[in-house]
Image (cartoon, grey):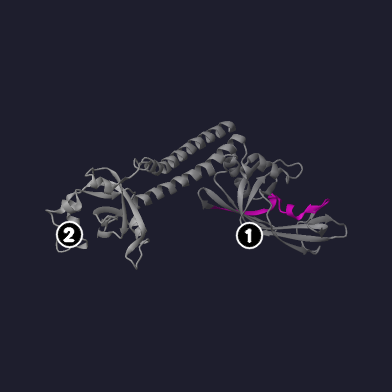
Amino acid sequence: MEQDKLLKSKKKLIILLLIYLGIASALIGFPICKILSDKNKDKEAVDLSELVLNENVKEGQYVKLEIDTLPRVMMTTSNELYYVTDVNSDIYIVRLSKRTFNNIVNTLNKETGKLNSSYQIKGITNNITEQVKNVALSHSYLIFKNNELNSDNFSEYLGTFYIKENFASDRTIDVYKILVFIGVFFLVLALGYVLPSIIKVSKGKFGIYDEENMMKALKKYVPAGETLTAGVYTVGIETQIKQVFGKCSLVGDKLIPDENGTTIQVNKKKFAKHEVYVGITQSYLILSECENYRHYYEFDDIPDTVETTVKEIDTDIPIADIGTCFPLAEVQNCDIKNAGGGAVKCTVTMENGSVLKLKIPKEGGLGMPHHTEYREAVISRLTSGNK
């Protein structure tokens, strides 16, 4: 049964991996394919001046144009129309991107009014449409004086074609960037989260979310004669543990048996979130931290006249192991509240004032196939108090 659950989980993860990789490939691959599919990227641009001289200009030719003066804008859009004068003083209509125009401006020498060096524009020849022609005529004063250019002589001055720069628009580039960004996000999810999960399932390794490892960690603190019946992974929100030990002395980080020693109350506290396993036996509540965490300790001498439960020790006890085993009979109250997402917050109060605030998740992960039933068993036993 457990093996079937793992196989189903592995199958779901593999499907999820393929979906994420497919989405990432599509989103990243589309812009790359568009760039690689540019039919002019490997072609050599033809000098436009030579084509004009030989009267061999046709629509759809990949051409280049050398300029040494700043283009004059005639239409402001995302792809602007310009009057461009080349190094031979011939005038053309060119559609440029704002990005290219800004690059040209950066080479302008303000003293001479010329570019510091010639700039090469590459683009595709397009037949002049009525719209382009009307825009050029309405802005002809930028280049031509005294209404020199008109509808009748238009082709004599500017020919029948204009050059459209070979570029992707700024908006298109922004879209490509967004697609690539989303694609990378799915790629990270696939390779950084789903794939490692598949590997863990295949190897049966789940880190702290491994039920077998959890049970081993809890069994270390089970008293003799008791049997661990359930265990769950939880998040410790706050712990304030009090335990009293008689006839002992504190030496370094250990309590040691001492016939001439005192009765010591150990206060062990932690107010930061930490991960902890919680288990139950027939008579005890067991805690085992998933990792080694730092705690705040206080040690108080308790007079023999004070009535409290005192634990006699016959062997050294590391203070780190204090607060790992509690008699269920000493559970005074267990308050359960919903924490969202199916999780619950569990506040356990002991008769001696110890308080454990825990968050128990709804799911335990692939490595904890019995989490649901163990979770119910732990909650049921804690809420039943000392019955």
State the SS at label 1: loop
Question: What amino acid type should be assigned to the residue bearing mark 2?
Answer: Ser
Question: What amino acid type should be assigned to the residue bearing mark 1?
Answer: Phe
In the image, 99: left or right of 19?
A: left
- Whether 360 is drawn above or below 303: the answer is above
Most distant residue in the right direction: 260
Q: CA distance from mark 1 to mark 2?
A: 75 Å
In the image, 153: left or right of 78?
A: left
Residue 247 on image: x %, y %:
84, 58
Mark 2 = which residue? 138
242 within the magenta span: no
Residue 176 on image: x %, y %:
39, 48
Residue at figure coordinates x 88%, y 57% from the top left: 259
Q: Nearer the viewer, mark 1 or mark 2?
A: 2
Instruction: Give, as a single range, the part of the protein colored magenta.
Output: 312-337
94 and 357: which one is in front? 94
Most distant residue in the left direction: 152
53 and 185: which one is in front? 53
Q: Quadrant of the N terminus?
A: top right
64 and 280: which one is in front? 64
Residue at figure coordinates x 21%, y 44% from the top left: 55
Q: Which mark is residue 271?
A: 1
User: Answer yes or no: do the residues labelled 1 and 2 have beta carbons within 8 Å?
Assistant: no
